[in-house]
Amino acid sequence: MGREKTSKSKFTVVGIGEILWDMLPSGKKLGGAVTNFAYHASVLGANAYVVSSVGADEPGREIINTVGELGLRDK
């Protein structure tokens, strides 16, 4: 057959959609299917971005900080 491609470059994944706080009895957790998808893609080695919108308030700023702490890109 053909040659196998051997590349060490990362692939890019962009998740577009909701990002939110799941309010659970144990506390709030960052959620939204798009965010979970992007996070797990980043764990597998992708350059992962989340495209969403958050409020200009404290919960919105917390989301932006948490996204950065998880290693996801927002810009």
Image (cartoon, rainbow, N blue to C red):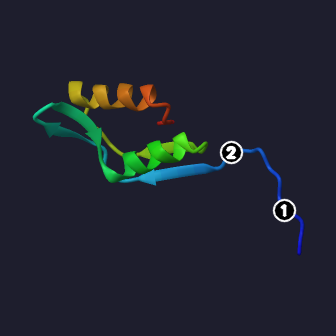
Apparent side of residue 28 relative to residue 4 in the rendered image (left or right): left
Image quarter (top left, top right, bottom left or bottom right) of the N terminus:
bottom right
Between 63 and 38, the residue placed more toward the observer is 38
Q: Quadrant of residue 69?
A: top left
The residue located at (26%, 30%) in the rendering is: 56
In this rendering, the answer to whether 16 lies above or below 71 is below
In this rendering, the answer to whether 53 lies above or below 33 is above
The residue located at (51%, 51%) in the rendering is: 14
Apparent side of residue 64 relative to residue 68 in the rendered image (left or right): left
Residue 4 image label: 1
Q: Position of residue 25 (x, y in %)?
A: 10, 34
Q: Could you give the CA–CA distance between mark 1 and mark 2, rounded to whole angstroms?
A: 17 Å
Residue 65 visible in rendering = yes
Q: Are marks 1 and 2 in contact (CB under 8 Å)?
A: no
Q: Which residue is mark 2?
A: 10
Task: Identify the secondary structure beneath mark 2.
Answer: loop
User: Which residue of the protein is positioned furthest toward the bottom in this rendering?
Assistant: 1
Apparent side of residue 46 relative to residue 9 in the rendered image (left or right): left
Whichever of labels 1 and 2 marks the residue nearer the N terminus, that label is: 1
